[in-house]
Image (cartoon, grey):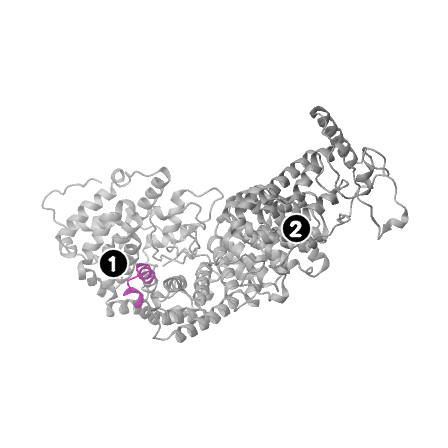
Amino acid sequence: MSPALITGTLGLAGSPLPCAHSQFISCPVPPAQQRPGSAGRRPRRPGVGCLPEEHFILKGKMLSPNDKKLEKLDPFYRPSMSKQKTSAEIISEARNALRTVRTQRPFTPREDQRKLFGPASSRTPENRPPSSFSLHASSFESSDSRPISSARLSPLELRPKAPASPALEEDLCLSFPKPPVDAAKMRRISSARARLFRAASQGALLPDRTLPPAELSKANLQEKDTEIEVDEVFWNTRIVPILHELEKEENIETICAACTQLHHALAEGNMLGNKFKRRSILLKTLYKLVDIGSDLLSLKLAKLILALKVSRKNLLNVCKLIFKISRSEKNDSLIENDSILESLLEVLRNEDLHTNTEAFLYCMGAIKFISGNPGFLDEMISKGAVEILVNLIKQINENTRKCGTCLPNSGHLLVQMTATLRNLVDSPPARSKLLSISALPQLCAVMGQYMADKDVCTNIARIFSKLTSYHDCCAALANCSRCYALFLKVINKYQKKQDLVVRIVFILGNLTAKNHQAREQFSKEKGSIPTLLSLFHTFYKLDLCAEEQMGEAQQPKVQRPRAPAEDVLIKLTRVLANLAIHPGIGPALATNPHAVGLLLATLEYKSIEDCEELVINTTATINNLSYYQVKNSIIQDKKLHIAELLIKLLVSNNMDGILEAVRVFGNLSQDHDICDFIVQKNVHKFMIALLDAKHQDICFSACGVLLNLTVDKNKRVILKEGGGIKKLVDCLRHFGPTDWQLACLVCKTLWNFSENITNASSCFGDEDTNTLLVLLPSFLDEELALDGSFDQDLKNYHKLQWETEFKPVAQQLLNRIQSHHTFLEPLPIPSF
């Protein structure tokens, strides 16, 4: 069988090895199974046009003169063009490659409880921030000043003052409201106050004053916050009555409604933020209400407190308050109704990361919980969550690079951020945004800088395992040249950490499945293959020990769940199979005793009933390695032992396993000893029986083995056992018009079989001779043969296969039959 990849969840086909001199059998894949965007090059089988005295063999032990001519002129593959592949090219690729084996992405169990760090975290309880804590009104500070930023405007020398009562100037106690003024006057006052506020905040009222040198610290200008005094009328008529309502604390519904009313009033009066006097009065009132303990009320309070731009400890406490509420899934609907997500994202977007690291931690923890609910994904993405998170990651990377070491507690924050991104990448728009802002190199940088943090590495591996299941994301990561060395470093550091290495190996499987350059880049990394084989050996031993410990008394193996070690081995064999496609790696693996020994050991102790996917992947890897006829090949040295192991698959009830075994026999049957083995063990009878499967893949592979057997004159008689000739003719009838490659293979086999023909009827039998005399002329009639209801691409593809592969062989076979047959009556031409 030609070497081919084992793909991930998308099942994309890969490119076979570009060897011009080889004609391995490969299995056909029905067009319906193909998906657009298959990777790899466009392979071509060498054409045929043998002289009557020549015969065929799979993989060219005995090539005809015309075959040899084509071998020099026509390469096994053509370089891929920059234009998008046609459906015909996609089908041609898949036809010349092995059937893809879909490997599932490693499963991440859903956590029962929402915590900053789940049960699988590598952090010990004493080395991580708490997920549970108590919050009360007393937790908040009464005075709240904004942290000094590095670039700010100078404060105003004078503050604009609106008329105010002395009582309110000197006392923090609330005053009773004054009689309301008429609506028109109210609007004028509010509008004037708003203009005054905007002008003051923009520094347009009075010129800046220069601070004395004593107020300069470390070349940084420091200042006091500019505060604008509130409009007395607006405060007394709109704000104070609501504050009185809040102090009554009659019932939750009333208080919640009052909070909503207060938020709207403050927004109307441009009093949100931290630039006005009496803000502390508002905050004190709001802090007191935290003790009520209502989640609904707490969310409204938190949203309002954040809108008032608190800082430092109060910012931390309000983030903790939201985090505490978000830990319960039943509160997701409350969070959605109050649009608290936008307030949380504003914290991440506008606050300083370094002075508020702990607040960011609990803010991100709440966002992480929310992102676990698919109903929030669209809102999060539309509000810029992806860009905000990637920007924060970039900040952390830059600071780590400047400082030369990881910042304190930044790892805790990164765990929350990467876990959130892991949830977001389930959405196509999020994946597009990640690609557009070049987020993948930033994630690679984080993994490199925080290599010692297993939780961070695991989350990033989960992100990449999801992303690389998609072609565009996989290609983007493959272009990050540093990722290969990075992944090898992770494997070496965490070799026995199954949950991490299984994802890294899955990612490597995706990269090497879809990108020939990725195979080459990975192979060039120092210690790449030894690292994989060392990991293979580690988990092979772990799985073997688990098998032995289970013993005979346990439940049947077929009923047990997949063991963690098995999952790693499944992903590893997939990577090896994909790497074996590369002409520089495949021969080296075929001659590597450690690599082949591990593969054979796996087949020796695992049955397909134990673990179907592992056995099939292992067999596919052996098939790819058996492609190479190289000196010192361990596959060739062990060919008879491999054949014995394949018989276990042939007699199983698993059709995929049977198919993989037949494909390996297709490569091995080029060898005379294997052909003898096939006949001695009656494997040829099994191949003949498989022709009845009415399945193109199986018929093609089985026919390839029979073709190689017919090279030996002494073995051609086996085709008459079990009705072999009739089954071949039936395959020609059933699949000919839709599969000219399979039809060509059938004709080659019949050609070899009939080399010493003296009479067509005595060679093929009367019935099959007559059938061939009807089928071949009709199949050679271009009008009849190519009259299918296909689109233009498929028509071109079928015509190409018909002209270059089927027609030359079929015409020679027809001439041979006609020249050795006596016609008694005209034969009818069937319609198709």
Mark 2, residue position: 318
Image side of residue 312 versus residue 62, left or right: right
Contact check, label 1 and label 2, Cβ < 8 Å: no
Mark 1–mark 2 Cα distance, whole angstroms, equals 70 Å
Location of the N terminus (image quadrant): bottom left
Disc number for residue 690 = 1
Residue situated in front as seen by the camera: 139 or 335: 139
Magenta span contains residue 651: yes
Q: Is residue 44 visible?
A: no
Sooner in the amino-acid sequence: mark 1 or mark 2: 2
Q: Residue furthest top?
A: 184
| Kind of residue at badge 1 | Leu
Quadrant of res 797: top left
Location of the C terminus (image quadrant): top left
The residue drawn where x is 27% and y is 44% is: 737
The residue drawn where x is 53% and y is 48% is: 332
Residue situated in front as seen by the camera: 325 or 35: 325
Residue span colored magenta:
648-663
Magenta span contains residue 831: no
Image side of residue 476 versus residue 658, left or right: right
